């Protein structure tokens, strides 16, 4: 028994706070990889878990790129079967900039079937949530606590106490709590861990579009120094758009009709990459900030997913990186169990942190530098950017390195 404990408290080995994409991925990895350990697990979310795709309007405008590594991990933990027939393979990614330099990343050159896959975001969320419900039904060691908001955590000697916002709810005690409650977590702040924030003064405009021709499984990214636009192909002739614009121009974009937006999109992006847009959905807006938690582990605690690192979607890597970290954390827990060590032991968790940071740093720095480099307006910088992209296209080992990094390898 730990300090402040009483018999009404619920005890778990592992508590996952947040049943978003990352919380569910972690739970799925644990069940697939170490369920024989029969860990007592709770997964908690402030929202109801629903397979109703109309529940979240914002996600109906979005598409998500899953990289090659995420697909492999999904296969390994029994999730890929939900997407195998519906996900759209990305065969090529073409990056272009305003001075006309371009670089083409190609799956065949890397001898893989696809560089990654595009899934409508609402489908991704819906299938992950129905997988969560299946896991809960099939494994009596998992407890799902939905509609329950966590307010604060408190360290005990060999465990952590999890307090709900509702005063009537019992406390929960865990050997390990994983905070996966999304970007700018209030729980993380309450622990005295702060966020280092970079405000890019940009907003991502997100929508879906239908093309006048097949998308040919090609993703495009087009850069100017005031915006970057990405096209993510899905189904035969559909695509997701993520157009990041400077906040100073945002009202202009917000006020225009869909028809006007379509026209601007065609002129400023479509014509540059030879894509013809037919129609467009409504738009949704995401402010672009990078939030990095000052610490990702503490005794009996791990911070995971957007709560640990919320990054600019310029390279579509935020969730992919978190999927990788879920796998690393599961390996760490497995090792603790094999060595009969408390799964929340700080020395063990620091080993997780060391490998996780090694994976995170290059991706986080790449996204940050790219956003900043393409925000600079001076002519010499423009020529240098253009030259760098041309060189990348022609230097095979460098191109292959970048391709493999984007694939999560
Ligand atoms: C425009 C845009 C495009 C993107 N595109 C891509 C892409 O193509 N590829 C990619 O890899 N990544 C992409 N990302 C990043 C990706 O969306 C995030 O990395 C991912 O959604 C993070 O998931 P998460 O589970 O950490 O957080 P969330 O999905 O936010 O989940 C957090 C969960 O915690 C719950 N919660 C919150 N607070 C509490 C509380 N106090 N108590 C209990 N529960 C709580 C919430 O209800 C929620 O269910 C994109 C991001 C943006 C903004």
Image (cartoon, helix red, strand yellow):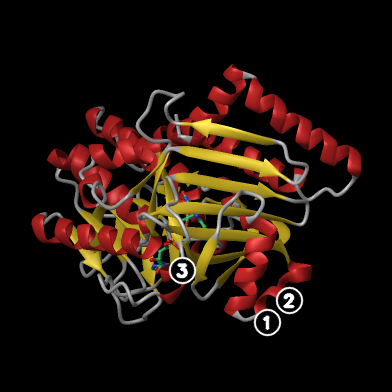
**Mark 3 Cβ inside 8 Å of ligand 1:** no
In which quarter of the view is residue 154 placed? bottom left
> Could you tell whether 14 is left or right of 308 in the image?
left
Mark 1 or 3, nearer chain start = 3
In which quarter of the view is residue 31 placed? top left
Q: Residue at x 79, y 69 (%)?
A: 248
Please give the residue where the numbered disc 3 appears in the rendered image. 61
Which image quarter holds the C terminus? top left
| Disc 1 to disc 3: CB gap under 8 Å | no
Please give the residue where the numbered disc 2 appears in the rendered image. 252
> Could you tell whether 9 is left or right of 47 in the image?
left
In which quarter of the view is residue 32 placed? top left
Please give the residue where the numbered disc 1 appears in the rendered image. 255
Q: Check the image and report above or below for 50 versus 303.
A: below
**Mark 2 Cβ inside 8 Å of ligand 1:** no
| Disc 3 to disc 2: CB gap under 8 Å | no
């Amino acid at each position: 028994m730990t300090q402040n404990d009483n018999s009404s408290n619920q005890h778990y080995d592992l508590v996952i706070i947040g049943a978003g994409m990352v919380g569910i991925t972690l739970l799925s990895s644990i069940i697939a990889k170490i369920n024989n350990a029969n860990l007592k697990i709770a997964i908690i979310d402030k929202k109801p878990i629903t397979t109703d795709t109309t529940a979240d309007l914002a996600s109906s405008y979005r598409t998500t790129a899953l990289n090659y590594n995420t697909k492999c991990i999904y296969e390994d933990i029994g999730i890929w079967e939900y997407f195998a027939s519906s996900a759209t393979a990305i065969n090529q990614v073409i990056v272009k900039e305003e001075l006309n330099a371009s670089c083409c990343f190609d799956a065949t050159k890397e001898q893989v079937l696809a560089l990654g896959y595009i899934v409508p975001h609402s489908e991704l969320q819906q299938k992950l949530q129905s997988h969560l419900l299946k896991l809960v039904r099939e494994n009596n060691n998992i407890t799902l606590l939905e509609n329950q908001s966590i307010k604060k955590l408190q360290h005990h000697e060999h465990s952590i106490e999890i307090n709900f916002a509702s005063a009537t709810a019992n406390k929960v005690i865990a050997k390990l709590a994983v905070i996966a409650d999304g970007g700018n977590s209030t729980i993380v702040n309450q622990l005295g861990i702060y966020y280092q924030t970079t405000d890019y003064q940009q907003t991502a405009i997100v929508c879906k579009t239908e093309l006048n021709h097949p998308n040919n499984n090609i993703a495009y990214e087009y850069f100017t120094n005031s915006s970057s636009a990405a096209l993510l192909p899905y189904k035969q002739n559909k695509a997701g758009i993520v157009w990041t614009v400077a906040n100073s121009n945002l009202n202009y974009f917000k006020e225009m009709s869909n028809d006007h937006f379509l026209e601007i999109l065609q002129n400023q992006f479509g014509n540059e990459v030879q894509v013809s847009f037919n129609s467009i959905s409504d738009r949704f807006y995401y402010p672009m900030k990078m939030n990095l938690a000052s610490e990702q582990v503490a005794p009996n605690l791990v911070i995971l997913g957007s709560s640990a690192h919320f990054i600019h979607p310029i390279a579509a890597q935020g969730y992919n990186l978190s999927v990788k970290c879920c796998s690393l954390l599961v390996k760490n827990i497995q090792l603790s169990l094999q060595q009969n060590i408390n799964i929340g032991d700080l020395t063990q968790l620091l080993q997780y942190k060391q490998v996780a940071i090694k994976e995170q740093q290059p991706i986080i720095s790449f996204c940050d530098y790219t956003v900043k480099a393409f925000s600079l307006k001076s002519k010499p910088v423009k020529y240098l950017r253009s030259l760098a992209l041309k060189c990348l296209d022609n230097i095979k080992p460098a191109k292959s390195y970048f391709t493999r990094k984007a694939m999560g390898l």
